Amino acid sequence: MDFSGIEKNLGYSFKNKELLRRALTLASYDNDFNNQNLEFFGDAVLEFIVSEKIFDQSSDEGKMTERRKTLVSDDALTPVSLKLGLDKFLIKSSGDNKNKKAIPSAYEAVAAAIYLDGGMDAARNFVYSTLDFTVKPEPDYKSELQILLQKSKWALPNYDKSTQDVGTAQKPKSRCKIKINGKTFTGVADNKQQAQKNAARLALQYFKKKSN
C-alpha cells in the first residue's frame, strides 16, 4: 500500500513504514498484526501531551481533568480522524463496517506510531497540529436534568430502556425517547450516549423555559 497520501495528511513521513501499517490495521483483518497495542500506548501518549499543553491553563484539577477528557474523547477524535482521512486508509476485513470505535482509535494508534518512529517531539508536533484544542467540555445535561426532576419530585427517565439503534451498518444512528411528566423528548445521534445527552438537553431546556 502506498502511504504517501496519508503521510501528507499527517504531516509526518515514517522511517519505519510498518509502524504506520500496523497503526492502520484492525484486528478484523489480522489477529496478530494490528493496532490494538498501539491504540493502548497512544492513549497514554495523547493524554500526556494534552496534559502538558493545558496544565497551566487552570488551577482547578477537576476542570483540567474534564477538559482533557473532552479533548481525547471519541467524540473529539472522530472528526479529527475523518479530516485526516484515516478512515479511508484503515486496513480491515470486508465485513467490518460497524466498528465506529476504529476511527478515533486510529488517531491514538497513529500518535503512538509517530512517537515510536520519531520520538516525543514528533508526536507532540502531530498532536498540536491536528487536535482541536478549542473543543469545550459539554455540559452534563443528564445530571442537571436529574437535579431538576428530583427537586420537582418527578420520576427519573430510564435512558437505557429508552434508547434504540435506528441506523444502518453504513450510517449508525441511535434514538433516545424519554418521557417526563407526560412530555416526550427525542434525541438522535451517532451513538447511544450522545442520543441520551441530546434527549436530556431538550428536556432540560423545556422545563427551564417553562419555569421562567
Image (cartoon, rainbow, N blue to C red):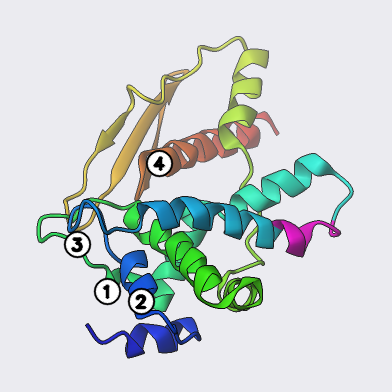
Q: CA distance from mark 3 to mark 4?
A: 28 Å
As drawn, 87 above or below 61: below
Viewer-proximal residue among 171 and 205: 171
Q: Position of residue 154 (x, y in %)?
A: 55, 12
Q: What amino acid does circle 1 point to?
A: Lys
Q: Which mark lies nearer to you, 4 or 1?
A: 1
The residue pinned by badge 1 equals: 88
Q: What amino acid does circle 4 point to?
A: Ala
Identify the residue at horizontal 41%, vertical 25% (top origin): 159
Q: CA distance from mark 2 to mark 4?
A: 25 Å
Q: Which mark lies nearer to you, 1 or 3?
A: 3
Side (left or right) of 18 relative to 145: left
Q: CA distance from mark 1 to mark 2?
A: 6 Å
As drawn, 52 above or below 27: below
Whether tag 2 and tag 4 are in contact, CB under 8 A, the answer is: no
Q: Which mark lies nearer to you, 3 or 4?
A: 3
- Residue 137: in sight, yes or no? no
Identify the residue at horizontal 22%, vertical 82% (top origin): 1
Residue 53 included in the magenta stretch of the image = yes
The residue pinned by badge 2 equals: 85
For disc 3, the neighbor class at 10 Å (few under 14, some 14 to 19, many from 20) is some
* Range drawn in magenta: 51-57
Q: What amino acid does circle 2 point to?
A: Gly
Residue at disc 2, secondary structure: loop
The residue pinned by badge 4 equals: 195
Q: Position of residue 93 (x, y in %)?
A: 13, 59
Residue 17 in which image quadrant: bottom left
Residue 92: give its label: 3
Q: Which mark lies nearer to you, 3 or 2?
A: 3
- Residue 190: in sight, yes or no? yes
